[in-house]
Image (cartoon, grey):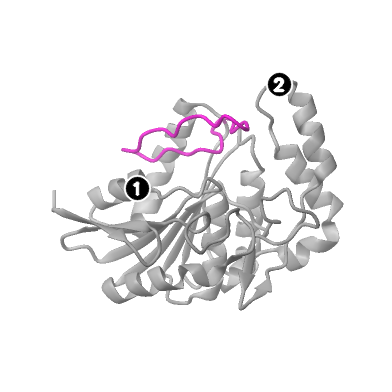
Amino acid sequence: MASVRETTLTDSEGVLLEPDGATTGVLVLSGSSGRIETDRCRMLASHGVAAASIRYFGGPGQPGEARLIPLETFDGVLADLHARYQRLVVLGTSWGAQAALLLGTLHPEIDAVVGISPTYVSWAGLSDERPQRSSWTLRGEQVPFVPFDDEAIEEAVKEADGELPSFCEAYLSALEKYADRVPAATIPVERIAGDVVLVAGGGDALWPSVLAAEAVRRRRTAHDLETIVVTHPDAGHRVVLPGEPALPLSQRLAWGGSEAADRELGLRAWPEIAAIL
C-alpha cells in the first residue's frame, strides 16, 4: 500500500489524506451531523484516492445549524483539490448529498458526483427558527427550498410513542403540501457535466431516498445524460461502504435498514463508485 500523508486543514476545519501517486481528489461531505468524515477519507485513501472532508457548519465563523450555509464554503477546498489532482469528485451523504449535487451544477470542473441517500430538492434549513429559511445561500441569496411540514413532523413524533421517529412520511407530505415550491427547489441536475452515481436504500426511514434518486435519473435522462442508481430494498439511510466501520445508531431518529443490508448496499455500490474514481 502506498504511504498516506494526513494533513489537518486549518483554513476550513477538516482533514486531507493524500496517498502517494494519487490522481483523483475527492471532497467527502457528511450529512446533518456536520462531522468530518475521517473514516471514509481513510478508506478512500487506502484505494489510492486523495480525500478531504471539512466541517461545513458548526465550525468557527460558520452557521451553527444546517441552514443558510453559503455554497461558496466549499470553493477553497474544491479549488485546492482541482489544482493538485487530475480528477475531481464530490461524495456526499444525505444532507451532504444535497450539497454535492448542488456543487455539481455550479462547478463544471467537477468530474463526478456521488450522492448517498440523496434528495432531489433543496430543503429548508434544519432549525427550529420560524419562518423557515433555506439550507443554502448562493452569492448571498437563499437557494429556493421546500419547507418542512411542521404538522407532519409533530405527528411522526407522536406516532413514534417514545421510540425513534421516522420522518419519511413527513418529507413526502412536505413535497405534496408545498408542491408549488418544488419546481424552483428542484436541483437542476442536468447542469452536472460529470458522472453521477446515486446510492439509496428502499428501507430508508429518514427520507425517501430511492424516490429522490429516481427523480434525479429521470430529469437527467430527459437531457440524454446517464445516471447510475444503486439500490437495495432493505437498506436504510446509513450506507456502509466496504472497509468502513458502521456509524453508531442515531439517538434522535430512525434510519431504517439494518447493518447487514446497509453493508450489502455499500458492497453493491462500491464497484460503481470505484469506477468513477
Q: Position of residue 15 (x, y in %)?
A: 32, 56
Can you tell which mark lies on residue 38?
1
**Is 275 on the left or on the right of 7, as rendered?**
right
Q: Position of residue 36 (x, y in %)?
A: 41, 50
Quadrant where the image shows the C terminus: bottom left
Residue beneath the point at 66% across and 43% down: 208
**Number of on-image labels:** 2
Residue beneath the point at 32% across and 61% down: 9
Q: Secondary structure at mark 2?
A: loop
Camera-side residue of 197 and 206: 206
Q: Position of residue 224 (x, y in %)?
A: 58, 70
Look at the numbered discs 2 and 1 and tell me whether their residues touch, using CB distance below 8 Å.
Answer: no
Marks 2 and 1, how far apart at CA: 33 Å
Magenta stretch in the rendered image: 234-256
Camera-side residue of 178 and 192: 178
Q: Secondary structure at mark 1?
A: helix
Q: Is residue 237 magenta?
A: yes
Instruction: List the single residue furthest toward the front.
Output: 60
Q: Position of residue 63 (x, y in %)?
A: 58, 60
**Is 221 on the left or on the right of 269, as rendered?**
right
Is residue 200 among the parts visible in the rendering? Answer: yes
